[in-house]
Amino acid sequence: MSDLEVHPLVLVVEDDPNVRSLIETLLSSEGYVVQTASDGLAGLVALRERRPALVLLDMMMPDLGGLQVLETLRGDEGLAGVPVIVITGRQESIPELRRALGPGNVFLKPFAVAELLAQVARVTGGP
């Protein structure tokens, strides 16, 4: 078996380099294969190149924001089933996001690391 078959691929779409690096380090140390994208457009390109087991998606990004990425993802028959966990700094958007994605799939920055890792494991089946 290849590494990608053994360890789920998680795509992290986050414009803040510090947050992106932190999440990448956390997930890698747990045994996940991590691909990152620094904006929504790069995230969509990465999604189409390699279908991940999960997308960790920031909502507030310049140019193509998380909401547009989510809408594009849900509108694409080939990608609509990819699970998404949202990380946002906007408290006011949380109720709507939780209705759309489920209460466990929305995290407010700053997020609890253990809770995020536990949800990633639940969604992907673990590393």
Image (spheres, rainbow, N blue to C red):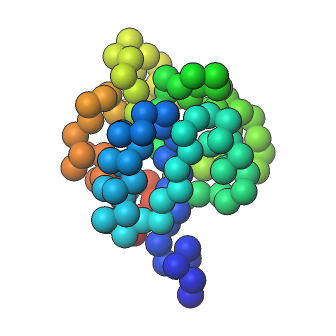
Residue furthest out toward the right: 77
Q: Is residue 86 visible?
A: no
Q: Position of residue 30 (x, y in %)?
A: 31, 65
Q: Position of residue 15 (x, y in %)?
A: 49, 33
Which of the image's four quarters has the N terminus? bottom right
Identify which residue is drawn at 54% across, 39% down: 38
Which of the image's four quarters has the C terminus? bottom left
50 over 15 or under it: above or below: below
11 over 95 or under it: above or below: below
Toward which corner of the image does residue 95 lie, by quadrant?
Answer: top left
Q: Nearer the viewer, residue 46 or 38?
A: 38
52 over 2 or under it: above or below: above
Q: Is residue 47 visible?
A: yes
Toward which corner of the image does residue 26 lie, by quadrant?
Answer: bottom left
Identify which residue is drawn at 35% across, 39% down: 18
Q: Position of residue 110 (x, y in %)?
A: 26, 31
Residue furthest out toward the top: 92
